[in-house]
Image (tube, rainbow, N blue to C red):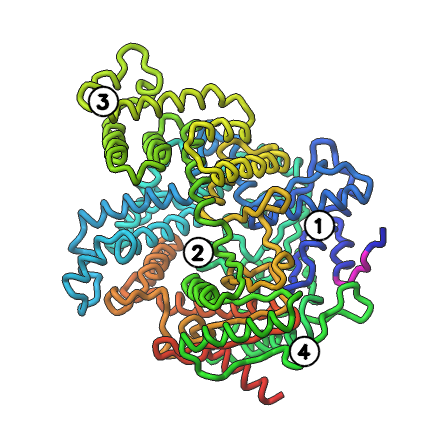
């Protein structure tokens, strides 16, 4: 087998044997391949003891499977035993591993539950409503003065929009940031004793306390808890640190720009013992700050340390020269000429370098129109018409090429999808990677499986009851019986007495007053008992047992059989996964967060090559890590990509809030002031707004860079005027430089 030639920069990385090393990698530089090669080289050259492993840590589950398969293939090539001597984990998965070593240090039992995002949001929504009911006058005072009483009531009460949703999001951000700072409710309560805090801070703190109490009652932790508790375990038990450092003498970290302060701290505690830590990332692709506690500044600081060997992977064979030029042009313009000097650090070196003539991955040839910047001021509908015409023409002339249309927000992607469908253009929407019917079927199964593993959780039991009878929603009588059964369940004191009565059956008395509902409950109980009896079976087989008790259509049954095969594959790839973690994998499918194309494919990986001749629709966030021959980058206006100009609007500043204040920025700024003990500053209305605006600008500049670097041979940028919008400042800078060339 002929091995691909190494680029000099890759060879420099692979010479690593020990110490701390940081690698800046440009898009398309082969960083995953290089890091996999390094892991395999270390397996071959380092004298590992039988109880030692090379630890590879990455951001997403999809990358775990990618790394596992790549390292496994290289191990076979080198004559090593596949699956031996290395472990690949997400940061949250690693945190879970650490906690399971000593759960008592985290105040947990061995059977602790990891709460998924859906359940966490459900709890926060409930707690937000409780606060709204008791503090309505305060929240009304936050509304804009020109908000009508009718609209104010809608904002306050509607769960789908307005104040309840905003308060839930505020509380979620507050809790995530507090945990990332290592601050539990009691810690913050102690800190606030010496300092006057705003009412909004106090409300978020009360929600935080109630939220943690609810988790404790459920015997559960959330994903942010995993990180915080793992850090706490390591900080309080030097022997555990020594034990884990021995187990993982080398730590290789991918996508390091997406790590948070506490995630980095976990790895650093271990790496200070091992002395061997390699971090690979691209701060120009740090695009998750908006909804995580990731901080790309941490990687920049790491690269600047005197005890770190900094290296670059600057060569990329992904894009043609013209597209590399415009990506580099954007990077250089941001660093030197962006009108808002505060955000000139959004993009950094290295610039992208095309591959050399003898490189195995040659850059694609350029078309005469490889880069098009459409300066015509389209309306929203006109831009949609342009996309229809251009994609239809491209597919006709390049039927074997891959093509994508990218937008910043889901709503625009959905609008493009509707337009392509109306014009009979074949497309694939990554946002809808799992059909609704499939998600509903898998969701039903998830809720029933949860009942097997959390049998005393009343909320779980009620949800299981409802989905068990979901096929009867159109039957008014049965629908009413399900509603009555739900009400009866809510008043039940002991679930175990219902499922397995010892003396008095609680259903017996109920059967006299409501025989229809009692019969429905009895059938549900009988089914659950059968599932309990089958729970000794492998997880994938248990899924099939449950499906036998459901009135499924043929396609639904086929879906569950496919899901069972999928889980079987996951069990083979992740033998350490517990049933709750397998349920989480199914939940990702139900929530449309995981691909589910078929058991023969990598379930986590969207492969553009499989969709030649079709238009792929995608957000810039979802596009990261993917590439297409042709990319249309749309809606590059000053709303989606603001710059700091007076006329720019910011999606984080709600129209219905007084003075369009950014409440999230305010509450997080106040949290930072309190935790850092900066007594020289006080929290005031508007605090944090400028910083939040600048951070949003940085994020959008990086997303623009990500969108541009998805294209291999051809790139088209356009904008629309929407509601009195103008082209983004970066867009204008690029077209002016294009005209000057």
Measured in 3D between alpha carbons, the distance from the residue under mark 3 to the one under mark 1, in whole angstroms, is: 63 Å
Chief secondary structure of the magenta portion: loop
Q: Which mark is residue 367?
A: 4
Furthest toward the top, the residue is 503
Q: Position of residue 120 (x, y in %)?
A: 38, 43
Measured in 3D between alpha carbons, the distance from the residue under mark 3 to the one under mark 2, in whole angstroms, is: 49 Å
Measured in 3D between alpha carbons, the distance from the residue under mark 2 to the one under mark 4, in whole angstroms, is: 38 Å
Q: Residue at x 71, y 54 (%)?
A: 33
Q: Which mark is residue 515?
A: 3
Q: Nearer the viewer, mark 2 or mark 4?
A: 4
Does the magenta portion include 7? Answer: yes
Measured in 3D between alpha carbons, the distance from the residue under mark 1 to the one under mark 4, in whole angstroms, is: 34 Å
Q: Is residue 206 above or below residue 318?
A: above
- The reply to whether the C-beta atoms of the residues labelled 3 and 4 are less than 8 Å apart is no
Which residue is the site of mark 2? 291
Q: Is 684 left or right of 629, judged from the image as shown?
A: left
Q: Quadrant of residue 93?
A: top right
Q: Which mark is residue 476?
A: none
Q: Position of residue 620 (x, y in %)?
A: 51, 64
Q: Is residue 51 above or below residue 417?
A: above
- In the foreground, 533 or 626: 533
Q: Earlier in the sequence, mark 1 or mark 4?
A: 1
Measured in 3D between alpha carbons, the distance from the residue under mark 1 to the one under mark 2, in whole angstroms, is: 29 Å
The boundaries of the magenta stretch are 4-9
- In the foreground, 411 or 652: 411
Furthest toward the right, the residue is 1
């Amino acid at each position: 087998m002929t091995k691909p030639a190494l680029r000099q920069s890759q060879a420099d990385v692979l010479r690593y044997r020990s110490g701390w090393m940081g690698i800046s990698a440009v898009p398309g530089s082969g960083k995953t391949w290089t890091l996999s090669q390094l892991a395999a080289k270390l397996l071959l050259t380092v004298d590992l003891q039988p109880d030692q492993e090379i630890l590879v840590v990455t951001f997403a589950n999809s990358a775990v499977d990618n790394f596992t398969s790549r390292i496994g293939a290289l191990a076979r090539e080198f004559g090593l035993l596949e699956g031996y001597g290395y472990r690949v984990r997400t940061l949250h998965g690693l945190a879970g591993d650490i906690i399971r070593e000593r759960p008592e240090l985290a105040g947990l039992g061995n059977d602790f539950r990891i709460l998924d995002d859906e359940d966490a949001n459900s709890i926060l929504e409930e707690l937000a409503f409780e606060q709204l009911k008791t503090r309505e006058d305060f929240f009304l005072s936050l509304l804009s003065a020109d908000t009508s009483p009718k609209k104010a009531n809608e904002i306050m009460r509607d769960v789908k929009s307005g104040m309840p949703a905003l308060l839930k999001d505020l509380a979620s951000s507050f809790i995530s940031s507090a945990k990332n700072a290592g601050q539990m409710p009691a810690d913050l309560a102690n800190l606030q004793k010496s300092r006057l805090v705003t009412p909004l801070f106090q409300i978020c703190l009360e929600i935080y306390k109630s939220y943690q109490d609810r988790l404790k009652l459920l015997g559960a932790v959330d994903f942010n808890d995993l990180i915080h508790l793992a850090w706490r375990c390591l900080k309080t038990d030097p022997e555990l640190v020594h034990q884990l450092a021995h187990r993982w003498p080398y730590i290789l970290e991918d996508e390091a720009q997406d790590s948070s302060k506490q995630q980095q701290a976990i790895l650093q505690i271990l790496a200070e013992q091992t002395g061997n830590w390699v971090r690979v990332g691209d701060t120009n692709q740090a695009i998750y700050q908006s909804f995580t506690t990731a901080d790309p500044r941490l990687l920049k600081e790491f690269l600047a340390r005197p005890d770190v060997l900094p290296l670059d992977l600057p060569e990329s064979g992904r894009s043609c020269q013209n597209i590399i030029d415009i990506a580099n042009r954007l990077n250089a313009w941001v660093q030197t000429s962006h009108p808002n000097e505060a955000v000139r650090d959004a993009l950094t070196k290295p610039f992208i370098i095309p591959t050399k003539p003898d490189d195995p991955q040659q850059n694609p040839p350029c078309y005469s129109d490889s880069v098009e910047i459409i300066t015509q001021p389209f309306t929203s509908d006109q831009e949609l018409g342009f996309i229809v015409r251009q994609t239809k023409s491209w597919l006709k002339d390049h039927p074997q090429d891959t093509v994508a249309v990218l937008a910043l927000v889901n709503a625009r992607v959905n609008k493009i999808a509707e337009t392509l469908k109306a014009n009979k253009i074949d497309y694939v929407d990554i946002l809808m990677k799992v059909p609704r019917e499939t998600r509903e079927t898998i969701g039903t199964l998830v809720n029933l499986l949860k009942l097997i593993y959390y049998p005393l959780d009343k909320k779980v039991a009620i949800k299981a009851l409802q989905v068990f009878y979901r096929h009867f929603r159109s039957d008014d009588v049965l629908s009413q019986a399900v509603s009555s059964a739900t009400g009866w369940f809510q008043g039940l004191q002991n679930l175990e007495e219902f499922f397995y009565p010892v003396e008095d059956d609680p259903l017996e008395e109920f059967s006299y007053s409501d025989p229809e509902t009692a019969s429905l409950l009895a059938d549900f109980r009988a089914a659950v008992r059968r599932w309990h009896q089958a729970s000794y079976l492998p997880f994938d087989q248990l899924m099939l047992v449950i499906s036998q008790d459901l009135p499924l259509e043929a396609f639904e049954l086929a879906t569950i059989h496919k899901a069972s095969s999928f889980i079987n594959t996951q069990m083979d790839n992740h033998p350490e996964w517990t049933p709750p973690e397998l349920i989480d994998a199914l939940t990702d499918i139900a929530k449309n967060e995981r691909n589910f194309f078929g058991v023969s494919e990598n379930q986590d990986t969207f492969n553009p090559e499989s969709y030649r001749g079709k238009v792929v629709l995608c957000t810039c966030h979802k596009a990261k890590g993917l590439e297409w021959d042709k990319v249309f980058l749309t809606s590059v206006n000053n709303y989606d990509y603001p710059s700091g100009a007076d006329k720019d609007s910011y999606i984080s500043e709600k129209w219905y809030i007084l003075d369009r204040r950014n409440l999230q920025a305010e509450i997080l700024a106040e949290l930072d002031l309190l935790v850092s003990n900066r007594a020289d500053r006080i929290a005031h209305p508007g605090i944090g707004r400028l910083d939040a605006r600048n951070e949003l600008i940085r994020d959008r500049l990086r997303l623009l860079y990500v969108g541009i670097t998805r294209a291999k041979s051809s790139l088209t940028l356009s904008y629309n005027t929407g509601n009195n919008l103008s082209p983004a400042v970066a867009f204008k800078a690029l077209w002016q430089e294009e005209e000057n060339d």
